[in-house]
Amino acid sequence: MAAVAEGLEPEAAATEDATQDAVDAADAVDAEPGDPPLLVGSRLSLDLYPGGCQRLLHLCARRSPQLLEVQFMQLSSHEDPRLLETTLAQVPCSLRHLRSLVLRGGQQRDVLGACLRGSLTTLPAGLSGLTHLAHLDLSFNSLETLPGCIPQMHGLSTLLLSHNHLSELPEALGSLPTLTFLYATHNCLRTLPKALGALSTLQCLDLSQNLLDTLPPEIGGLSSLTELNLASNRLQSLPASLGTPTIPEMPRLFLNSDLDSFLVTPQGCSVTLACGVRLQFPAGATATPVSIRYRLRLPEPRLVPLGPHDSLLSHVLELQPHGVAFQQEVGLWLLFVPPRARRCREVVVRTLTDDNWSDLETHLEEETPKRLWAHCQVPHFSWFLVVSRPVSNACLVPPEGTLLYSSGHPGVKVTFPPGATDEPRQVYMQVVRVASGELRALLEEPGAAASPLLCLSQSGPPSFLRPVTVQLPLPPGVTGLGLDRSCLHLLYRTPPEATWDDITTQVTLELTHLYARFRVTHFSWYWLWYTAKTRVEGLARKAWERLRLHRVSLIALQRRRDPEQVLLQCLPLSKVDATLRRLLERYRGPEPSDTVEMFEGEKFFAAFEKGIDVDADRPDCVQGRVCFVFYSHLKNVKEVYVTTTLDRQAQAVRGQVSFYRGAVPEDVPEEAEAARHRKGTDSPWMATLPIKLPRLRGSKAPGQGQGTSLSLAPLNLGDAETGFLTQSNLLNVAGRLGPDWPAVALHLGMPYRELQRIRHEFRDDLDGQIRHMLFSWAERQAGQPGAVGRLVQALEQSDRLDVAEEVRAVLELGRQKYEDSIQRTGLAPPDPSASPSPESAQA
């Protein structure tokens, strides 16, 4: 035993008896038949087997000469802390040539499948004697402070500290002369040491998922830094020192959407935002440092310019300062989920320039089959979004004439003769496929058919100097030999009118076996039909609208443990079953509505009826109606907290939620009667689904969860002047968090132990966990300024920008109401320079 204890620190030597017991027990462990060899060459793997500490002690006790050859060792930290410390104390004297030491936790999981942290809380001081150690991995452990031996490991080049409980890093960390990679993600770091800037060899620094609100200016001294990850912190800006000449090339930054600005210098930089945006600023893009601001907005009709057959694939990205031209184009990548139907369609990035939306040249880069990057070059900043549209072909028409083909539809082409224009002009072509089956069903005619729909547009004067020849393929099944020309119709449409005109008698149709050609002097939409109907203009309008419609269903679900929390969603028909299966464990409700047909970007609303009311403080709630905008490829979700205007002490309340277009009719029809009065897509009523609020049963005993009723104390968070959140607002926030609530709690400053206590007290009740966390925090903020701001910040830092945006809108609505009430009561002096509004004149 003396040989084993040689070189031990005093505290390790005091555990000599325990060590001897472990060595004795390990004699049998090391010789288990069928186990792969622990020691292979210079690698010692002890993390995959139980009793790794005992095995290592056994090898050390035998003084195996192979230990001197070990350079890489892995040992699980899911061991008894006392035994783990004793074992690690043996390492310096037995594995003198060790270059890599991995002491990770995370190999074991709890009942919910989450990785468990290891028991490691410190390291023996003797580990500083590992003079050859270059790689140290302490991830997924319970470190609250950095062990004092680490700053003395002067050969260390890689230090992994992720998933611990570190609240700070020591100044002594700056004494590591060769440190190249430092990863400290998912900790509780609030500040960084100034000495961090002395790590001149540091190349990659990952500090994501912490609580940092500032960075020391000394971080600009990291002259070798190439990658800096600051995602999911509390930062509002970056120090200007990051762009100083000390750093020859600006590092690649990983930022979160809570960091709404960063500095770009003439050196350039690469920035990755957690919201699915990448920016590449080449060197020389700016002559002076420029502060870049960004914001991801929810799509609104005024911010989303869509053509008749376009689909929105992303939220709206705003980059500021607007209109500032770069000396070199900046690379922009936007992440999106590709549409299911991609045949003859393309993806483009659309931007706003001088009050006009235009399409940028876009290239697609695949991250996974279900995630693509849309890449483009931008000369200045504005608004950006990703759109799916029919394939567009363009060309510049010179005075000598040219030919324009459709790349997606062979046979569609336009011939420009010499002299058609006296100055070069840009022309564009889009072709939309038409399903013959739908057309025949609409016309109720088996032989009806139509060519592809052709859209032609141009820049410059509206008309050409000489007629331009357009070629369209004949409708499917129709050939130029022996067709009945009286059944062939050329239809023409000029935006923005939705009417189609039959211009067959106004042009000369030249027919070949497969094609029809005609001459025009200005561009619009053209469509070739073959039908026995004599009046086809109205039918063409209906067919054109059918091409733009999406078949959707509406759902209304109630949370199982809180039926007053209602989820409303509008889904394309193909996504309904999969969505319901995913939500089944947490929600219940009626079957989805019948199929409803809607346009991309169409605005509609939901109204609660028969004694059920909705929180009127919602910014998207107008006169008790919740407004929606439908986008086929984005989530169309609203979660609302509903109440009742009736007495529920005696009985449950049965009501309904109805979905409408346009204005709410004065007499809301019953569900069955409304179904009989439905008149297709133009009908204001779309669907009605039942809602049932159970009878109030009073509060449950502590520890039994919230059940179907709420025992939360009413409160107002904030103040009327700066905006406040009511109990129903907080319940709406709680209902939206889902499994993200622990991240929000940590960003609100809750200790990790309190999170564990909440998980235990409300086990098997996710909604109870969320509500208890949020309301217990809110009650502690009573009377404290800035509480609402801290909540918004925590939501942003937890990647819940959707909830943060909604809270901001609620606050803004509250502030407006407060200011209006001040003006009405005369408590605020009127502005003498302001002219009276119509409302005040009427008052």
Image: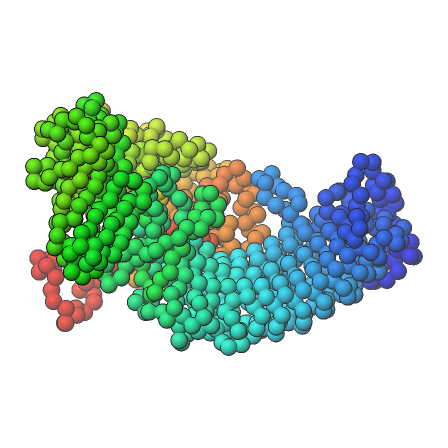
Residue 141 in sight in this render: yes
Left or right of 73? Residue 780 is left
Q: Position of residue 276 (x, y in %)?
A: 43, 53
In the image, what residue occupies the spot 57% across and 63% down?
205
Towards the viewer: 283 or 656: 283
Towards the viewer: 131 or 744: 131
In the image, what residue occupies the spot 60% across and 60% down?
183
Q: Position of residue 436 (x, y in %)?
A: 25, 29
Q: Where 90 sits versus 220, above or below?
A: above
Left or right of 361? Residue 418 is left
In the image, what residue occupies the spot 29% across and 33% down?
551
Q: Quadrant of residue 288?
A: bottom left
Quarter of the figure with the C terminus: bottom left
Quarter of the figure with the N terminus: bottom right
Q: Position of residue 347 (x, y in %)?
A: 35, 48
Residue 779 in sight in this render: no
Tell me the colour scheme of the image.
rainbow
Left or right of 537? Residue 335 is right
Q: Position of residue 107 (x, y in %)?
A: 66, 45
Which residue is the extreme one toward the right?
2
Q: Quadrant of residue 174?
A: bottom right
